[in-house]
Image (cartoon, rainbow, N blue to C red):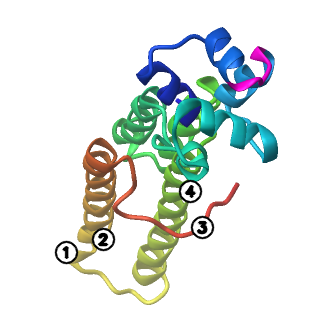
């Protein structure tokens, strides 16, 4: 929700009333409420009509729409059933993100985390095979490698879910995105 829309609703006035009060066209008000930032004379006139400072009018109080967060949580949790099959733990969140058109930085980073964990799974699998086959290192503890990998991935997914729920952000981040 744009700051202009929330201020207008708080004052309980229509777009037409705000237009008359500010001298700004209804269409311009609609564009600003849809996300276009107000500038120059428009910003001054709207701020004066609403009785707020210009900086208060351009400050966006809600950066994320709650429905987006719902899908972000679902996209994050969609990797859980496919944790045992590394290509699918990427495919499920990616397909859901594409189907629901949720191309936010958070969803992209969630998919990046799963891509990274799939790459790590491949490296760990090759390492265990090389240790077993080439160097003849056989240990009953080798089975712990994929188990620890799965436990860490489970922790990352669940911890990020909790953080998305509480703060609309990720707790465990990678700091980059593959796409």
Q: Nearer the viewer, mark 2 or mark 1?
A: 2
Q: Nearer the viewer, mark 4 or mark 3?
A: 3
Magenta segment: does it hold 12?
Answer: no
For image coordinates 77% across by 45% down, the residue present is 39
Q: Residues within 10 Å of mark 2 (few under 14, many from 20)?
A: some
Q: Is residue 114 left or right of residue 54?
A: left
Nearer to us in this view, 10 or 94: 10
Q: Which mark is residue 145?
A: 2
Could you tell which of marks 4 and 2 lies nearer the N-terminus? 4
Secondary structure category for the residue under label 2: helix
**Residue furthest bottom in the image:** 135
Q: Is residue 26 left or right of residue 65?
A: right
Residue hosting label 3:
176
Secondary structure category for the residue under label 1: helix
Could you tell which of marks 1 and 4 lies nearer the N-terminus? 4
Residue hosting label 4:
112
Secondary structure category for the residue under label 4: helix
Q: From the image, which quarter does the C terminus lie in?
A: bottom right
Q: Quadrant of residue 81?
A: top left
Residue hosting label 1:
140
Nearer to us in this view, 171 or 47: 47
Above or below, 30 relative to 1: above
Alpha-carbon span between mark 2 and mark 1: 11 Å
Nearer to us in this view, 15 or 71: 15
Query: Which stretch appears magenta?
Result: 22-26
Secondary structure category for the residue under label 3: loop
């Amino acid at each position: 929700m744009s700051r202009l829309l929330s201020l207008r609703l708080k004052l309980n006035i229509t777009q037409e009333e705000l237009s008359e009060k500010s001298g700004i066209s209804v269409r311009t008000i609609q564009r600003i409420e849809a996300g276009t930032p107000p500038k120059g004379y428009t910003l001054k006139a709207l701020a004066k009509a609403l009785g707020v400072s210009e900086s208060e009018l351009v400050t966006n109080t809600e950066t994320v729409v709650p429905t987006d967060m719902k899908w972000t949580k679902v996209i994050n949790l969609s990797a859980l059933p496919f944790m045992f099959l590394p290509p699918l733990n990427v495919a499920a969140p990616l397909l859901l993100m594409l189907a629901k058109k949720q191309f936010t930085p958070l969803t992209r980073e969630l998919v990046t985390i799963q891509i990274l964990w799939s790459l790590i799974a491949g490296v760990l699998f090759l390492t265990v095979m090389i240790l077993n086959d080439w160097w003849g290192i056989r240990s009953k503890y080798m089975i712990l490698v994929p188990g620890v990998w799965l436990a860490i991935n489970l922790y990352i997914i669940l911890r990020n879910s909790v953080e998305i729920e509480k703060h609309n952000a990720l707790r465990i981040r990678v700091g980059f995105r593959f796409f």
